[in-house]
Amino acid sequence: MEPAWLPQGRGRGRNHSQVERSRPQRMAAGRPGSGVERGGSSTKMAVPSEGVAVHTKFEEIRKSDQAAAQRLMNSRLSSSSSDDDDDEDAEADHKDAKRGQILESTFTTYTDQTGGDATGLLRTGQYVSELFQSGALTCLICIASVKRTQAVWSCSSCFSLFHLPCIQKWARDSAFLVSSVTDEDFGQKQHPWPCPKCRAEYPHSATPTKYTCYCGKLQDPPPDPWLVPHSCGSVCQKELKPSCGHACLLLCHPGPCPPCPKMVSVSCLCGKAKPLPRRCSSKAWSCQKPCGRRLLCQQHTCSQPCHSECPHCPRVSLQKCVCGLQESQRPCASPKWNCQNVCGVLLSCGNHTCELVCHDGLCPPCPRSLSRSCPCGKTKWSLPCTEEVSLCGDTCDRLLTCGKHTCTMRCHRGNCDTCRQEVEKECRCGKYRKLLACHKEYVCESKCSKSRSCQKHQCRRKCCPGNCAPCDQNCGRTLGCRNHKCPSVCHQGSCYPCPVTVDVKCACGATSLTVPCGRERSTKPPRCKELCRCPPSCHHTSRERHRCHPGLCPPCTQPCLLPLVGCSHTCPQPCHDRVLVKSQQVQLTGPWQQPSEPAFVTKALPCPPCQVPIPVSCFGEHEVSPLPCHHRGRFSCKRPCGQPLTCGNHTCSRECHLVTNNDKCGECEESCSKSRPPLCPHTCPLPCHPGSCPPCSQMIRQRCYCKMSVLYVECTKMTSADGDMRLAMGSCGNQCPKELSCNHRCKQVCHPGACEVKCHQKVKLRCPCKRVKKEILCALSSEYVVECDDTCKQQQKKVSQLKEVEQKAAEEEEQKKRQDELEAFTKRQQRGGRRSKKRGRQEDTENQSGSARCWRGLAFVLVPLGGVLLSVAAYILLNS
């Protein structure tokens, strides 16, 4: 039901009449026995080779037409307002699963605290689900979709999302509108601005300047396909409302935070029961025992079950008034009451009584017991309270109500009269002046020409002082939805968004989506889980089961099953009664003519040739192959014929052909191919013949085993020889030229295979001192060792003794040399005080040179002599 403020009728851009969707008409298809054939012409039996080409061409056309039809359908069903991730209906199931994973990850920290209970997440889950639903999230200012890649701002009161540039412009325009109402504070005060939806006021400092996530931790959050749009993915941690000391446990999310899921230990409302573990969001619980607390009346106790605050006492009791003169039955909730009687108590003066109505406390003193004056206040008197003050007789001179003149009458009792003095007065608007009584106001007849707060209409009030009243006319401007007009009073700036919502329904009307007014034209219809109810448009009795969808139904994919022409089979191809085929392009007349977009025409294609496989044997009956029904008949399998020829040795090598009396296999034209004796590499020189072949007389040229000589052997002798004879025929009779691993030549005659490993040639081995030598086989030389005998050991001992003697003689000579040097040094030290240093050095030098010459002469004689003696001694030792 529409609100009462909406005017009768609709604005432009919207039609209330329900437009029925046009359904494609069923095309008449030919049936067996009818006069009209499918495809517009009668089908004839095609030649097999032509049938294969027709079928291939049909398949190519069908695939290209289906691809073009799918592209056309996708382009027509796509919506410009939907997000990138909601464009394809084929991925609906995958996106539903992805959405479920995102919701589950967002609510995991909450459900872990509640043991899987998600009843407190219904409202928050609705806000999160609307983020993933195409067209459900709309900016109320610009009436456009809010996408995951756009900067947004969320209201902290109603949690509505707006584009960040839209809300910034809204805040500026709202502040300007309020500031422009009065000229005194224009541009000086920072006025608040309201939320476009809930009208919650925000101060000027709260105008959004940055794009942040819902919890405000991350600036410019990047779009993540595995997170809630415009979320940072971290824990919200906002303080819960009502405040309980805990923070929100969900991941950064839109909408209100859910109730606190923490477990706390609290007592009941009255505080008598023991503390029990309860959810923090529902920690207030009642033990259902009577309260028993004393009420405000201090007479009765509370009898209600356990609760937080006691109500007013519901009972009635006898209570006195404030002055205590009367008693009455009054509710205990309001014990104080006035009897509305004059007090009448005698005052302290003893002459007058209290004139106040029923009151509590002491009565005030007598007003006449104080010092008094005459009515004009010029003369003061000190009189008892029983006497009246007399008039002074002077001019009153009290200020009149006009505030400018005084009373000209004599001192009198009571109020002064109104001021009747004539003065020149200015009207309220300040345009005219006139003599009038002081108590009268001058109002001229001129009308105000200033603009009101809307800056559109004039004030038109008589003698306006400048504070023009706000405009009281209706705004009437068309709202952003283009369907309704603004119902507010005429104002300045942008109108508030249209508050009306519209239901966008699916094709069958079972599912609807509520969107702001004006958004229904660009919103994609919601996905419906009901089955499509459209009747079939082909020859089938029913459509395939598929969900409700906008636009035309998808092409029928059921098997055609119509009987084919020329056989008893049915068409197994998908239904092709209504296929989108690209229309024939018109030939361009010149370069100035632009090519038009290809048009698609719904057309019924003929059934393809029958492809049912039928077993058929080839001409030579080599194989039985399944052939398409429209191409059945005997065929050539492309194999050789295989029929025996007249020679009895070969078969027909022609391609598989039909053997008849007129077409027989020909004569054999090949050479003899009978198997030869073993090891004979030659073929029979005769043409193909029956019986055995003659013996081979050709010579075989081959190398001997050592590869040094070339041998010629007759083929018949080689093939008829036994094993030993055949081995002997392959040897040249010379010694084998190969070397063994020990570098000796093989001693065998030319032989096949590898040479023997063991070498039988004799080699000489010596002991370590090279004196003893022995001859053994080369194969045993690596294992045999020649050791020294006793003689070798004695010679080695004598040589070692001789070396010791030489070493000892050298040591004695060195010791003697050192002793001589020591004696010479001692002598120089003893003669050092009696001779000069220069002379001492000369003597030492002469002594040293003389001793050196002596030693060199001895060495020249002794060294050759010692060498001769050592040689003689070594010879004697070695020969002994």
Image (cartoon, helix red, strand yellow):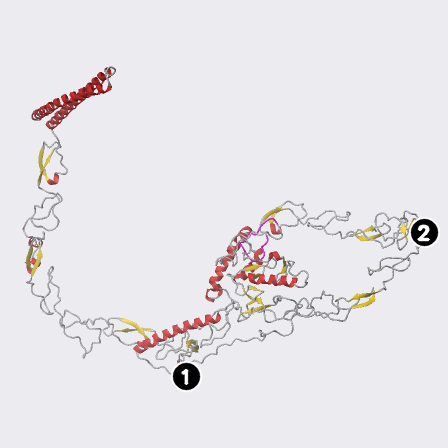
The quadrant in which the N terminus is found is bottom right
In the image, the segment drawn in magenta is: 244-259
Residue 287 rendering spot, x and y as whole percentages: 66, 48
Task: Answer whether residue 245 is magenta in the image.
Answer: yes
The answer, for residue 1, to whether it is visible in the render is no
Q: Which residue is mark 2?
A: 387
Quadrant assignment, res 657: bottom left
The answer, for residue 682, to whether it is visible in the render is yes
Q: Residue at x 13, y 32 (%)?
A: 768
Residue 554 rendering spot, x and y as whole percentages: 46, 72
Asked if residue 247 is positioned above or below residue 520 in the image, the reply reads above
Q: Amino acid at mark 1?
A: Val
Q: Amino acid at mark 2?
A: Glu
Left or right of residue 630, residue 26 in this image:
right
Residue 223 rendering spot, x and y as whole percentages: 49, 58
Number of callouts in the render? 2
- Disc on res. 439: none
Task: Answer whether residue 405 is magenta in the image.
Answer: no
Alpha-carbon neighbours of circle 1 within 10 Å: few (<14), some, or many (≥20)? some
Q: Which residue is mark 1?
A: 36
**Magenta part mainly helix, strand or loop?**
loop
